[in-house]
Image: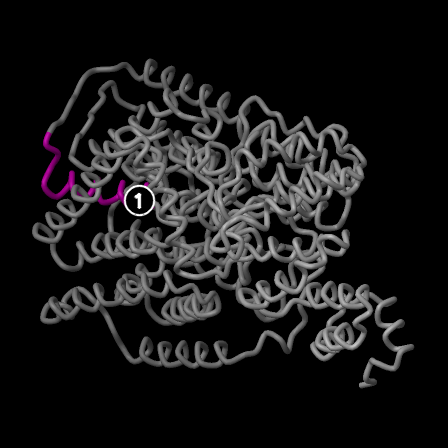
Amino acid sequence: MDTEKKPIHGGGNNLNVFWVGVLLIALAVAAPWFNLTVSSPELVKSYIASFGVSLLMFLSLYYKCNNSEVNLKINYIKLTLFLLFIFGTLSTLWSINVDFSVSKWLLWLISAFSFILALNLSIENNSLTKLSWGLILTAGVIAIIGILQYLFDPFSLAQNAMPASTFGNKNIAIQPIILILPLSIFLLLSKQVQNLKAWALIIITSLVIVFIFYTTTRSAWLAFVIELILIALYLIINRIKLREWSHWNKNKGYATIFGILIILVLINLNPNSFSNNSVVNDLFVDSSTIYSLTDSVSGQAVLSSSLRFEMWQTALNMYYDSPFIGTGLGSYSQNLANEGYATWVINNTTHPHNDLLELAVELGLIGLLIFITVAISLTIGIVKIIKNTSNGENFFYYLLFIALIGSFVNMQFSSPYQMAFPLLLFGLYSGLIAKQVDKTVGPFKTIIFPLKVVYKKIILGIATTLILIIFYFTYYCWINTYNQLEKINISKDFTNIEIVETPIYHEGMSGILYSLGGSYFRHGRYKQSSQIDEQLLKIWPNHLDTLWRLSYAKHKLNQNTKALELATKLKELEPQGLYYSYIAQMYIYSSTQEISKFHQTFKELLSQPENFLKLNADTYRFLLFFTLSSKDLSQYAQTIYDKYKQYWGYLCEVENNIAIHYFNLEQFELSAQHTMEAINRNGDCLNPQLIKLLDEKGLIEKK
């Protein structure tokens, strides 16, 4: 990609594609570099993508305002994408949460503007080569930051799942790379890429491959394998004509060997031998911390494919209840958190990790059918391009299509199209394919009508103003709110937490509040956690985890009346397998000395079906703990302990509590056995007083 000073105007009434590359690289770098305790990488990228692509799109349209004619070319790709966008926009009318729908619609707007921008770019080979360089450099930036994090972690960026580059999560970071990497083959075989350019390309590509290896993301690996197979298939089929339009020499061969050596060396480096900046990660709170993978599974369930099936089932349940038009853009998280679709294991995720299922939830069967027509239109468009152009010309568009296929494979197990970067690339790629279809086979309908240049500019000015107003009441307010929340979090004074109530709630704010409240809750700062959770309940009044946390926090703050009210509400909402309402009530009754109610609640919980009691480790753990509060309940301690061990195995806290139980019964040898079990496992949770008393009796073996 050329680096000399570039005019914005690219000639021929087209925007210089160089600036698209600049936007992509800026988007790769964009992150909350300074907000370290409250941050949302995805909001920052959405903000940059929205303003950047809007600016470039309006500039590209401005260059078309030099004649008194409007020429609209319509093909099936444009038509189906237009229908999908319009139907998604209309879904705000029946959305279960309009604010969340607006947040999601703004992401779709990025893709729509990117599509329009692509239609106004030059598709000459030189421009496509420059665009490919911009994309590869973007992938390189993502990869280099991620590799440095994996080996050294020198940046202040916190990561939920390393190495995350600037995305906060490695699974999100890999999504744009899936869409970019196939284009490295286009450049590698290009006659324009020679000498040092070839070496630079292969080194960058090698680093990208290393980053992919470091992420250990199976769905991404599957997507890349499918992409490689389809590219190899194309090259094999067209091997006879390959030399006519491609270029390969010894220089590229040597560079490739060097690239392979880089890969082999880097994938064998051990990150544990380098420094690790973990302090920032301990402070880090962002919307992807709880909401990126399997999120909250009550802290117990193991991340596995079966868990992903559980998420998919929640999406299917939502679809079954609103099968035709869905519940509106961005509604999955609202449905799960507040509308009764939570299960004992899936109750805090914002995405089902399958974009097709999420689309079905949001737009129902109609939305799915429109999307299928989009996929068919793109496929037909690529087939027509391949049939009607030479291999050298159609190879670029074939690679775009392969990149989309790889991304579509990935979206069966992840959520790339809930993120700004992949949506921007989808709009860009589909727009380029649509424009090439117009050039190759022509549109099926052309609408031409006169419009004076001055009127064009007035309309463009009005549209620009309207978009700026929308961005002011959304992105500007959201960014300002996150900055204010950062300051509040540093001060630890959440009296003014209401500042998060922007004109339109950002969809990610609920995740931020949930994560932030949870952080204070886990550290025993119940005043702060209760203030945050009270604000979150304004958004999601039926959110299970928040009701539990707030109930317990109110109990710890000696506000037992309010705590009992929250626990009672939670009891009405909790699905089988979750029993935090019982736990909260037992804490409250124990504190208020309502012994009969305490015993009644304990026995009521213990009488629940074992198939449900065993699902969450906290249930038996708390039951054992409460047996220590009453002699009448101590008879259940051994049985509860055995059940915990049967289903969940060893836990230091459980061994400590059963040891205390036997000590209270003056069965000191049994108490010592359980104490030694924890000591031998380096248990650091043991009661020091218990160890001292047992040691005085000579029952603790010195190690």
Residue 60 is situated, as x and y percent measured from the top left of the image, at: 35, 33
What residue do we see at 78% from left, 76% from top?
672
Residue 227 sits in which quadrant? Answer: bottom left
Q: Is residue 625 above or below residue 524?
A: below
- Classify the position of the C terminus by image quarter: bottom right
What residue do we see at 42% from left, 39% from top?
8
Q: Is residue 504 magenta?
A: no
Camera-side residue of 14 and 410 = 410
Residue 305 sits in which quadrant? Answer: bottom left
Task: Tell me which amino acid carries mark 1.
Answer: Leu
What residue do we see at 47% from left, 41% from top?
342
Q: Main secondary structure of the magenta part?
A: helix
Q: Is residue 427 magenta?
A: yes
List the residue tagged with mark 1.
Answer: 356
Which residue is outermost to the right? 696
Residue 553 appearing in the image: yes
Camera-side residue of 118 and 151 = 151
What residue do we see at 52% from left, 44% from top?
348
- In this rendering, position of residue 29 left or right of residue 155: left
Residue 264 is situated, as x and y percent measured from the top left of the image, at: 44, 80
Camera-side residue of 203 and 575 = 575
- Classify the position of the N terminus by image quarter: bottom left
Its colouring scheme is one colour
Marks counted in the figure total 1
Instruction: Categorize mark 1 by other alpha carbons within 10 Å: few (<14), some (14-19), many (20+).
Output: many
- In this rendering, position of residue 198 left or right of residue 519: left
- In this rendering, position of residue 353 left or right of residue 81: right
Q: Is residue 531 above or below residue 310?
A: above
Q: Which residues are magenta?
A: 426-444
Residue 228 is situated, as x and y percent measured from the top left of the image, at: 27, 67
Residue 14 is situated, as x and y percent measured from the top left of the image, at: 31, 37
